Amino acid sequence: MPIGSTMHTPPFPLRILLLNPPHTAIGSRIPREHLPPLGLLSIGGPLLDAGHDVQLLDADIGPLPMHRIIEAVARFAPDVVMMGHSGSSSAHPTVVRIAGALKQCLPSVWIVYGGVFPTYHWQDVLRDVPTIDCIVRGEGEHTTRQLMQAYTADHDLRTVAGIALRIDGVPTSTGDAQMIVDLDAYRIGWELIDHDRYSYWGGRKAVVVQFSRGCPYLCSYCGQRGFWTRWRHRDPVLFAKELARLHREHGVQLINFADELPTGSRKAWKAFLEALIAEDVPLSLVGSTRAGDIVRDADILHLYRQAGVIRFLLGIESYEAATLAKIRKGADTTEDRHAIQLLRQHGILSMATYVVGFEEETDRDYWNSLRHLLRYDPDQIQLLYVTPHRWTPYFNDVANRRVIERDQRNWDYKHQVLETKGVPPWRVFLWFKFIEAVMQLRPKALCRVLLQPDPELRHGMRWYTRMGRRVWPHEVLGFLRNMLRMRPSITVANFWGGSDQLPEDALAKPQRRRAPIALQVITGSAVYATRDAAVSMPGSSGSEGHP
């Protein structure tokens, strides 16, 4: 039996079940549409290629009740169950419940847990949740394949970098895994899903993809940047071919980018757009990026639209220059507004995200936020509540602020979790919903919903409006149910179990070779030159927390 395992040496190939737990967040329940669990599919491909018998159970569709989950797992009779969720902080309590129920029914099954939250909180999880046997920390494609190889060969699991497990009952990390430089070295296990079950954007058959991982910017509240450690991208032409194949073979219509910054390299992004245009497939693309990249690409935005880009989400976050500087956003309000205008000129919808709660705000701050957003005039708006994670630098800023929401399932950016001393929770909620209502019901917004001449844009606007009508009653009723128990109690530090920030980088960085760069820093082009040099090393081909 390999050191660190809890069962007999299993046969090869292993029977591995990838389990996507049901999620309580509004984004999972209200749209009545679901996107494939990209993280699990990303480890599924390499495990299939290694010869294992792999299946996916997506319990988020439905969602499946606990007894149905246990029945489905028992029917497959796996040697290993691997669980993970893109919203892993708020999904963690559900994972704990499932792990406990599985061990009661199948005591010999080996439960492996991965994702952003367990990557950082591995000590807490292994200490408090005895039914979880092993944690994969950081990127899982290489690590899970090595882990399963060591497990079946009866090797010491401590030789596998990038995991955490109990050794003599003590939670132990094997160190950080090496960051994957060549993102094309591992394929996504698309054959594990029935594409007909997944849709987005109002019934469009859809998938989630990543062109790139990471982000070079230093936003202090972002829970994703350190998880990926460094920005890198896939081969633009190969990536375009994969998207085209998904359309031709499976009828996929909508591509949802999970990247923090797919446009990070102008050169690579332009090459992807041109390659996708050459494939001549009617795909619609939605994703998130930075306003600065839109302004940078003003001269090639026609390629965005021609390739199928229909909407980009832009993180506006705050109207206060001092707040933007404090959270290290690296943006300015003039650039944000210009980006929205440029997108509209090229027939691309803009969604502005705005985060409430970075500071101890007042009623005047909320009023100024509304005025600020009206000046921006985005097509769509998404308000969020700041949600601090212990592995982010922002944790240090708010460690002593008090928590009003102690149910971890509600730490999903759509529930108030921090006290605002000058404004009670009910009034924060009223401001939140008032800003949303004004932004969505102002004459310009209504005209765009009702009279938009472009059928694709009209479809997107009307779908988002219909979804908003379903979300509103759910959020209002949910707040009323929770309001009586929303009392300031412990601090953020006490809630997460410590006053110190956890190490932010989850992966070991390869040695970086920098190319000489001309003095172009005034225009900012040196940033992109450095980035391109970094991903051109030999062997290279070229979602928690950052709204």
Image (cartoon, grey):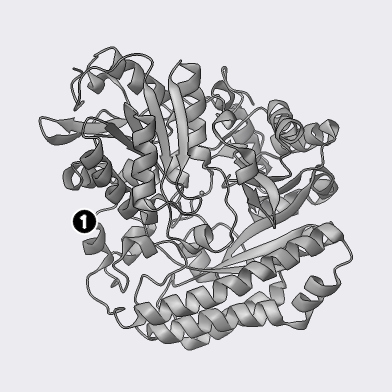
Q: Is residue 78 left or right of residue 168?
A: right
- What residue is pinned by disc 1? 498
Q: Where residue 224 sits: x, y (%)? A: 46, 47
Above or below 540: residue 361: below
Residue drawn at x 53%, y 77% as measured from the top left:
473
The one nearer the camera, 529 or 391, is 391
Mark 1 falls on what kind of element? loop
Above or below 191: residue 273: below
Q: Where residue 470 sits: x, y (%)? A: 59, 71
The one nearer the camera, 390 or 12, is 12
Above or below 13: residue 119: below
**Is residue 523 visible to us here?**
no
Q: Quadrant of the N terminus?
A: top left
The one nearer the camera, 449 or 226, is 449
**Is residue 169 visible to us here?**
yes
Q: Where residue 18 sits: x, y (%)? A: 42, 35
Residue drawn at x 45%, y 79% as measured from the top left:
477
Residue drawn at x 54%, y 31% as measured from the top left:
192
Q: How many marks do you count on the picture?
A: 1
Image quadrant of residue 167? top left
Pointer 1: residues within 10 angstroms few (<14), some, or many (20+)? few
Residue drawn at x 59%, y 24% as measured from the top left:
184
Image quadrant of residue 257? top right
The one nearer the camera, 23 or 357, is 23
Residue type highlighted by circle 1? Gly
Q: Is residue 27 left or right of residue 84?
A: right
Q: Where residue 111 sits: x, y (%)? A: 29, 35
